[in-house]
């Protein structure tokens, strides 16, 4: 008798789960709809009856969000024992950035490698990615054109979101089809020659059965010149979606396609004084020759079904499949010798295929028991991830049999670097590796309001399982398989005062990551999954009917098994090194203010330390951040329709290893010298059809590192630049 394989078991669970949901969603089990309450009661109870899983658009709502559902519960932000930031679509538009990492710099995050990877609370937690509509996704670069809002959960959240780091998780909520017809075209141009055009149309298709079918189509393109010499930022975005709604059920299906051609890695380099080297001019600071780029093609399918059995109980099932293929001939500065003022370039063919499939099932219900209000949430998620990595080194880049091309850093003449096409590389004896990971998470979380509007308790438990197979040579079928089992928990308490205007909270939780699907150690084995535990206490304020809100948290996080960038192996693959235990301690917070629908301000801050078990700094950690976005809108008079705004951020105490640098007396780490970055913007609504935006990026021409891979692999912000945007609504 043959035993079923892990894959067979996994798919059997998926099928059984889907079948169970369909049965449960059938009319035979649905309860009659309750009578509609009077209008005044309906408004009063809007927060209670809000669906946990149905998405509410944030476009046109301003900067401040009072409600959040990232913990899959019906709760106001004041009721949640954890720090949460909501980045609405209005705030995203005013920030004016199109990549997640760059948006996060204004709201308390720090880029990690660029693109979708991020850091929170000072820690260099190993690479994890945001979730999309609560489902695990994995891609390197994605334009946020199809995103409605971003939920930032600070602190451990792995009980509900497996594969999330200890410092927090980010949930990107997508734009959904709307029942009201709306169409817009937005164009944007920069003073360095980059053009962007985006179209967005949505509306009703018609009645289907007893429900309404709506559509949405978002698409766009970016072309022209990148800010830095020899760089591209070409993009194609295509996001169609359909959504069917009736009184109790919502079904959404969406397809995502993006193709982004850009530099593969951050390639600026550090000087011994901690400043990014710009000796050849700021636009030449990436050292990129012509032809050195990478294309990231992402395609995926998303679907979810939400069914409300009654006023208080509902279930959601989510399906997600996506893949990302990145390929290109890339040139990286592998080392800098500041004593001889030389820079060594390295060339390889990048070819990576990342595949992800997941299913999730969540059920939420609220009820009264023992005179107390209860809320239970339970469910599961199952994911399969596969990464095929083919990194082929050009061993003749510096001449026959010479891997490195060494140039004087003050005059590298990168345009003469011999960059071969992707198709001209010769496959090595070991053409690549493949890592496959299958993991599941079964969770239960319970909230109870012990004293109405005074005391809430939260408790949760999850069982996390993972099985990861690593094939070091894809010409072979031999795999090293590692299994992992972890018990996850989350406990919290919220004490409320002043009619819920003041809340004190405490929370403790743990997390467990699966082995990395792409990161390897120097011996070629997969980077093992890190684990950790954290605790935090905090205070939340919501005054003047929610116009002034504040959250301040003090936290203590301990992680075991983190890995940092170690270097590049002779075969061209980047590898990581384990650093053991790390400890992150500090405080962070956010303050938001809205006055008379004219003035909006959000500011955030973090201060803390990140140390390893020997009390040493941790590579690519940071000590403090501050960010803000504010806007004043003229509602009356000659300036009606005009709004003036400012945004800014500053990260300090960020350290990186000097391993790829050579100079006399170098320390183990360099502290980066980073300038405050400020942008100014003006929005003008001419009428209900035409609107315009003028944006001055980096008004004071400051220099600041963004993503960091190593001391010779940094992403830097662009210099002072001007952009103009026009939008037309049909």
Image: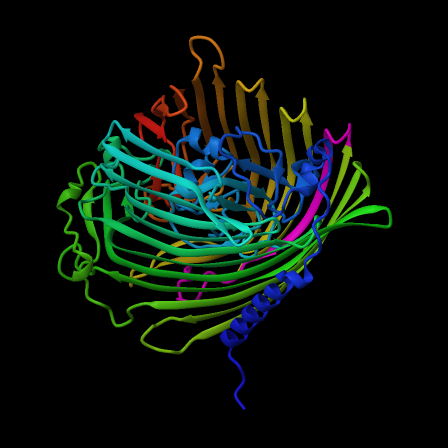
Residue at 49 percent across and 18 percent down: it is 632
Residue at the top extreme, as displayed? 638
Q: Is residue 147 magenta?
A: no
Q: Is residue 509 magenta?
A: yes
Quarter occupied by the N terminus: bottom right
In which quadrant of the rendered view does residue 349 lie? bottom left
Specify whether 341 is left or right of 591: left
In which quadrant of the rendered view does residue 41 lie? top right
What are the residue bounds of the magenta stretch? 497-526
Residue at 37 percent across and 41 percent down: it is 665
Magenta stretch: dominant secondary structure: loop
Do we see residue 379 in this rendering?
Answer: yes
Specify whether 724 is left or right of 509: left
Quarter occupied by the C terminus: top left
Residue at 36 percent across and 21 percent down: it is 700
Total count of labels:
0
Do we see residue 133 in this rendering?
Answer: no
In this view, the residue in front, 53 or 358, is 53
User: Relative to 274, is 71 above or below?
Assistant: below
Residue 476 is situated, as x and y percent measured from the top left of the image, at: 34, 77
Residue 427 is situated, as x and y percent measured from the top left of the image, at: 22, 68
């Amino acid at each position: 008798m043959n035993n079923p394989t892990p894959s067979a078991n996994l798919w059997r669970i998926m099928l059984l789960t889907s079948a169970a949901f369909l049965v449960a969603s059938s009319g035979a089990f649905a309860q009659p709809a309750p009578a509609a309450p009077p209008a005044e009661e309906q408004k009063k109870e809007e927060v209670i009856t809000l669906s946990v899983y149905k998405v509410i658009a944030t476009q046109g709502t301003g900067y401040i969000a009072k409600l959040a559902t990232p913990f899959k519960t019906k709760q106001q932000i004041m009721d949640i024992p954890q720090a949460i930031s909501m980045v609405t679509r209005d705030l995203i538009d005013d920030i004016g950035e199109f990549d997640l990492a760059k948006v996060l710099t204004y709201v308390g995050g720090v880029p990690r490698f660029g693109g979708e990877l991020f850091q929170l609370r000072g820690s260099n937690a190993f690479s994890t990615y945001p979730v999309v509509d609560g489902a695990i996704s994995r891609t390197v670069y994605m334009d946020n054109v199809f995103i409605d809002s971003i939920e930032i959960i600070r602190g451990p959240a792995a009980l509900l979101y497996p594969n999330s780091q200890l410092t927090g998780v980010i949930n990107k909520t997508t734009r959904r089809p709307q029942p009201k017809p709306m169409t817009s075209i937005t164009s944007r141009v920069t003073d360095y020659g980059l053009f962007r055009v985006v179209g967005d149309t949505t509306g009703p298709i018609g009645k289907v059965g007893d429900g309404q079918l709506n559509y949405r189509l978002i698409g766009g393109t970016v072309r022209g010149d990148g800010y830095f010499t020899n760089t591209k930022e070409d993009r194609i975005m295509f996001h169609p979606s359909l959504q069917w709604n009736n009184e109790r059920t919502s079904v959404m299906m969406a397809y995502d396609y993006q193709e982004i051609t850009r530099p593969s890695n951050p390639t600026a380099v550090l000087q011994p004084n901690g400043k990014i080297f710009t000796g050849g001019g700021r636009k030449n600071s990436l050292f990129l020759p012509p032809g050195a780029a990478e294309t990231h093609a992402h395609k995926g399918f998303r679907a979810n079904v939400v069914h409300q059995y009654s006023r208080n109980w509902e279930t959601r099932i989510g399906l997600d499949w996506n893949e990302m293929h990145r390929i290109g001939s890339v040139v990286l500065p592998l080392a800098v010798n500041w004593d001889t003022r030389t820079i060594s370039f390295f060339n390889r063919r990048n070819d990576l295929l990342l595949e992800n499939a997941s299913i999730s099932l969540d059920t939420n219900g609220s009820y009264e028991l023992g005179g107390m209000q209860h809320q239970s949430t339970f469910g599961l998620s199952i994911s399969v991830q596969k990464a095929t990595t083919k990194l082929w080194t050009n061993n003749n880049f510096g001449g026959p049999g010479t891997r490195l091309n060494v140039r004087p850093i003050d005059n590298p003449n990168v345009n003469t670097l011999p960059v071969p096409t992707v198709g001209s590389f010769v496959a090595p004896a070991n053409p690549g590796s493949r890592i496959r990971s299958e993991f599941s998470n079964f969770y239960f979380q319970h909230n109870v309001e012990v004293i109405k509007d005074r005391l809430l308790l939260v408790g949760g438990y999850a069982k996390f399982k993972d099985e990861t197979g690593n094939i070091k040579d894809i010409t072979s079928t031999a795999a090293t398989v590692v299994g992992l089992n972890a018990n996850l928990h989350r406990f919290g308490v919220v004490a409320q005062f002043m009619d819920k205007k003041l809340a004190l909270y405490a929370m403790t939780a743990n997390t467990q990551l699966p082995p990395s699907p792409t990161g390897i150690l120097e011996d070629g084995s997969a980077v093992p999954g890190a684990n950790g535990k954290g605790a935090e206490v905090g205070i939340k304020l919501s005054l003047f009917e929610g116009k002034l809100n504040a959250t301040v948290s003090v936290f203590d996080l301990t992680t075991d098994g983190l890995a940092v960038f170690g270097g590049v192996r002779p075969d061209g693959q980047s590898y990581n090194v384990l650093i053991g235990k790390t400890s992150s301690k500090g405080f962070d917070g956010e303050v938001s203010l809205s006055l008379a629908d004219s003035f909006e301000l959000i500011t955030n801050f973090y201060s803390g330390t990140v140390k390893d078990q020997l009390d040493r700094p941790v590579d690519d950690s940071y000590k403090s951040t501050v960010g803000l976005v504010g806007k004043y809108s003229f509602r009356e008079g000659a300036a009606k329709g005009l709004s003036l705004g400012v945004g800014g951020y500053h990260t300090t105490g960020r350290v990186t290893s000097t391993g790829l640098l050579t100079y006399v007396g170098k320390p183990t780490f360099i502290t980066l010298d980073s300038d405050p970055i400020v942008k100014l913007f003006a929005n003008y609504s001419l009428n209900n059809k035409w609107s315009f935006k003028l944006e001055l990026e980096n008004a004071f021409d400051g220099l600041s590192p963004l993503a960091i891979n190593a001391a010779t692999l940094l992403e830097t912000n662009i210099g002072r630049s001007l952009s103009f945007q026009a939008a037309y609504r049909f």
